[in-house]
Amino acid sequence: VSTWVPSALASVAYNGTRGLLRTRSADTFHKGTVSFQISEQYGKQNDEELGPSFFGSADSAAVDFHTFITRASLTYALSDFFEIAGNLDVRNWIRTTQEATGGVPLDTETRGGLGDTDVSAKLNFPFHSQKFKLGGYGNVTFPTGSKERGFTTDSNDITVMGLATIDLSDLETFVPTRIHLNAGYRFNQNEDRGYGIFNPANPDSSGFNPPGYPFSPGGEQTTYNDTGIFNAAVEFPAPQVTFFLEFDWQKMMNVEIPSDANVGPSTDRLSPGAEL
């Protein structure tokens, strides 16, 4: 939901400010533009095992966890070159039982509540070029969520990114196209406990991702669990609809993952989409 209805050039990214899903454009909205957005993110943890440590007996169970993050975002352009955004999360999870031994009773369980708040700012460097644009982006989280329910990182995590946009939307001899590149770094600040490394026996102690990063072992530098970020997207804008394809890559820069673990230090996503 927004207060502007021009052509369908990049709207608002998940964390606020002008962009697509996870990729941001280097340019900003026109001064005075306000955008309010509600988004929903769903995840599923399949076939998690609950064993004796959970039941206090020899019983066991296989369960699924369904996770939901509902995000409210507000973006405001203070000028033609600078915009700010604020976001508030509501986090929920539902545990359902797939199989249990010995007829052990294990009811469906739910948990929900407010998550953390974060604020963002983006500056579009005022170059004269209409086809090549550069910008800078920053985001800070605030621990407003419930610590008892695992809905907060309990820290001020910081993200900084450099942004570039190549705008070919006004070329008469070429399909209207915009290309966006982002590169940045997330400083994960909860060194003592980490966040989002899911513990099915006690989700309240671990929380669920995103974000997700481990604690820093003794003797490690504070950069141990920080994350490098790279995004790229191509966008085909038109007056009524925009089609896009987006790539997102994130990598924990210094963390050591055991060789027998079923996870890696990096994740990547390729997301096609359309905006009406």
Image (cartoon, grey):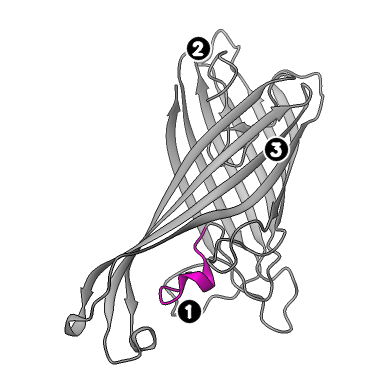
Q: Amino acid at mark 3?
A: Leu
Residue 41 included in the magenta stretch of the image: no
Identify residue for label 1. 259
Task: Pick whichever, 214 or 243, lies toward us.
Answer: 214
Identify residue for label 3. 163
Identify residue for label 2. 239
Task: Pick whichever, 252 or 204, lies toward us.
Answer: 204
**In the rendered structure, which segment of residues is drawn in magenta?**
197-209
Q: Is residue 15 left or right of residue 126?
A: left
214 lies above or below 90: below
Q: Residue at x 27, y 78 (%)?
A: 61
Q: Residue at x 70, y 28 (%)?
A: 76
Q: Earlier in the sequence, mark 1 or mark 3?
A: 3
Where residue 44 sits: x, y (%)?
Answer: 37, 58
Residue 197 seen anywhere in this rendered image of the structure = no
144 lies above or below 130: below
Q: CA distance from mark 2 to mark 1?
A: 50 Å
Q: Earlier in the sequence, mark 3 or mark 2?
A: 3
Residue 208 included in the magenta stretch of the image: yes
